[in-house]
Image (spheres, rainbow, N blue to C red):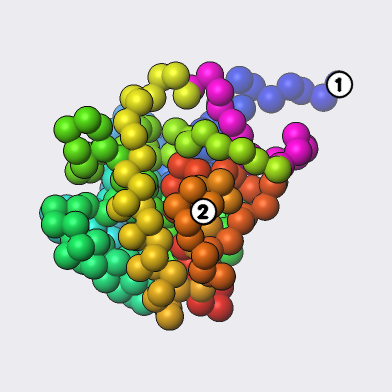
Amino acid sequence: MAMRPRPRLLFDIAVILGLTILTQLGGIAWLMARFTRWPLAVFVVSYAGLAIGAAQIASAFGRQALSCWDNGPLQVQSWFYCAANRVYVTAPLEDVLQDAAAAMDQRYPGTITLVLDGSFPLIDGFPLLPHLSHDDGEKADLAFYYRDESGYLPRVTRSPIGYFAFEAGPTACPDVWPTLRWDLDALQPVFPAHTLDEGRLKALMTILAADARVGRILLEPHLVARLGLTSANIRFQGCRAARHDDHIHLQLIGR
């Protein structure tokens, strides 16, 4: 008679898989800590050591971490992305991001452009879920800009992590399965009712679309029409991929 896996073993497997999917390195840290006397403390120390080590060798994979402490016009939206090792990009992509943020700050003084997911530090092809790409350091997501009745809101997003607070608009996508095109209707009333800053968003899209280093920018068609954007570099991601009316996706040319 086959023995059933013990609950603790199943728990450990789930934790290792979950942390690996979320952070790339967390599963290794949990495995290192699992059989020690103080597993949580050892996990924290091990994870911190792995993350620091990965930052040191990421250049061998052609990547570098965006600064999590920079107070300039380009900033990481949440500590989560830094803690989860999701802020790695190639040097050319960092240049694109910094240049776009600087151009936005020049056009609209005081504007802060927020980065969401980049890539993990190690290994091309390692998926950064739930994205279908973001596996080589040459893709990144940017948050939308928002305002209220008082004006522009620096460093503010409707969602705590910058994703999933969707802008309402028409779509031609059918209800298909499988799909990553989540509507998350139950969450929408929870998010603050900040207004999309259309002027800043259109300016950023125009700056990115005119950059010869940028190959593709993803934005939902109803927002493209709403903003009056016409660049051939601005594309629709397809009906099975995640919605892009909560953030901008960009990638370098040739990717």
Is residue 222 or residue 53 the one in the foreground?
222
Query: x%, y% of residue 206?
Result: 39, 65
Query: Which residue is denoted by mark 2 in the rendering?
Result: 224
Query: x%, y% of residue 145?
Result: 31, 45
Residue type of the residue flagged with mark 1 = Met
Q: Is residue 113 magenta?
A: no
Q: In the rendered image, is residue 218 in sight?
A: yes
Query: Which residue is denoted by mark 1 in the rendering?
Result: 1
Q: Helix, strand or loop at disc 1?
A: loop
Q: Residue at x 55, y 78 (%)?
A: 254
Q: Quadrant of the C terminus?
A: bottom right
Q: Is residue 174 magenta?
A: yes
Q: Residue at x 47, y 24 (%)?
A: 188
Position of 135 compared to 6: left or right? left
Q: Residue at x 41, y 19 (%)?
A: 190
Residue type of the residue flagged with mark 2 = Val
Earlier residue among tags 2 and 1:
1
Picture layout, residue 117 above or below residue 161: below
Q: Residue at x 44, y 47 (%)?
A: 247
Quadrant position of residue 173: top right
Task: Please state the extent of the stretch shown in magenta in the rendering.
Answer: 173-187
Q: Main secondary structure of the magenta part?
A: loop
Quadrant position of residue 78: top left
